[in-house]
Amino acid sequence: MSKDTEHTYHNSSHSQADESDANEIDDKRLIDDSAYQPSVTEDKDVSKTAIPDDTKATESLEDEDFSEDMSEADKETIKKLANDDNLSQAKSYASILVEQVMDAKETFERSLGSLFTSAFTAGLEIGISFFMILSAFALLSGVLPSQYAIVLASLLYPIGFIIVVIGQSLLFTEQTSLLSLPVLNKIEPLHKLLRLWGIVIAGNIVGGCLFAALMIGLGLNMQLFSVSDIDTYAEHILGFRWWVIFGSAILAGWMMGVTAWLVTSARDTLSRIVLVTLITGSIGFLGLHHSIVGNIEIFSALLYGNTVSLGRYLLFLVVILVGNTVGGVVFVAVLKNRTFLFQIEKVKEQTASEQAEARSSINTRRP
């Protein structure tokens, strides 16, 4: 054998040995990474600043964002599921839920004054929907039967909701399911949730009552509508048995919880406006009972109409608040959160299976 040939042979042998060691090390790294690290595909050509703010929330999860009772494996699994930086596809189920939990946690940390002011603003803003509906109803009732005029006027229902949701004011029916998520995941205590709900409800109702006292009175003086129009619309809302109103409020709360979910899933403002319009427009078209808008509708009749008493108003308000709460919490927060927990268990099983296969592959390579 020549010296050149021998030199080449030795280099080749060393290269093969190094390559074999490198493959074994890579296999071990694969096991470690699959067990403890989220699977994130990095693109060196795309900077982190190019990712929108609503996706960063799921990429910066810290241990304090989880319940103290949660295991490290569960925390890492949630981080893996929540990572969502593919802007060309819809957000993942886990990414939406984790983002909602993060937003709810921020709300829990706000001061009481900030919470009440935001809720009070939402109560004022949502009144714009009723002002527009009542004005349109008064105009259409002169040329159409009352039932058709009400349905067509209700198509203006989304206006106030768009202002509230896009403006990020605190509306109770939108926040019902959202704020319950940290409690369901044992991050925040129940008593803080009840206090938070109380502040948001109080702000929404006070804001709505003030809007009714000022703006509905202004509309009467501008002759945009009449007292009889206010009474007719109020009876359209109240003209059912209490259990029918309760069931209608549950459905409305469910749909508002779905609205919050879909708004979080959207990546741009235009999509959010379209989603809010479709869902809340359906609530208005069907005549479902929404507690915050309903408060303005019936309180206006209490102040300026002739058919609504204080007792009737208070009973109505309690029934629809409870119904909206049940719809938002049970049908959205509980069911969506439970689905997410099942998804975590599935991913943990898949990860364990991948680890076993990787170990088996290493063992078969060894002599």
Image (cartoon, helix red, strand yellow):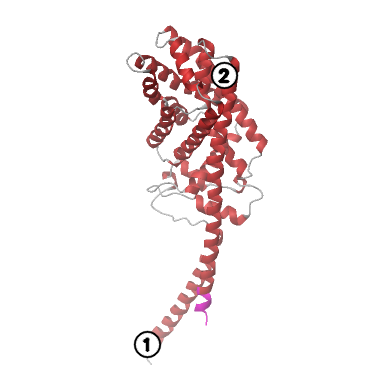
Of 327 and 200, nearer the camera is 327
Of the residues shown, which amino acid type is indicated by label 1? Answer: Thr
Q: Give the quarter of the figure containing the N terminus.
A: bottom left
| Label 2 crowd bin: few (<14), some (14–19), many (20+), radius 10 Å | some
Residue type at mark 2? Tyr
Q: Where residue 246 sits: x, y (%)?
A: 55, 30
Any mark on residue 313, and which? 2
Magenta stretch containing residue 366, yes or no?
yes
Residue occupying image coordinates x 56% and y 29%: 243
Q: Is residue 172 magenta?
A: no
Residue to which mark 1 is pinned? 5
Viewer-side residue, 174 vs 230: 230
Q: CA distance from mark 1 to mark 2?
A: 99 Å
Q: Quadrant of residue 199?
A: top right
Q: Is residue 294 above or below residue 301?
A: below
Neighbour tally class for label 1: few under 14, some 14-19, many 20 plus, Cα within 10 Å:
few
The percent coordinates of residue 217 (x first, y second) are: 48, 10
The span shown in magenta is: 361-367
Q: Would you identify the image quadrant in which residue 129 lies?
A: top left
For the residue labelled by badge 1, is the local secondary structure a helix, a strand or a loop?
Answer: helix
* Secondary element type, mark 2: helix
Residue 51 in view in this figure: yes
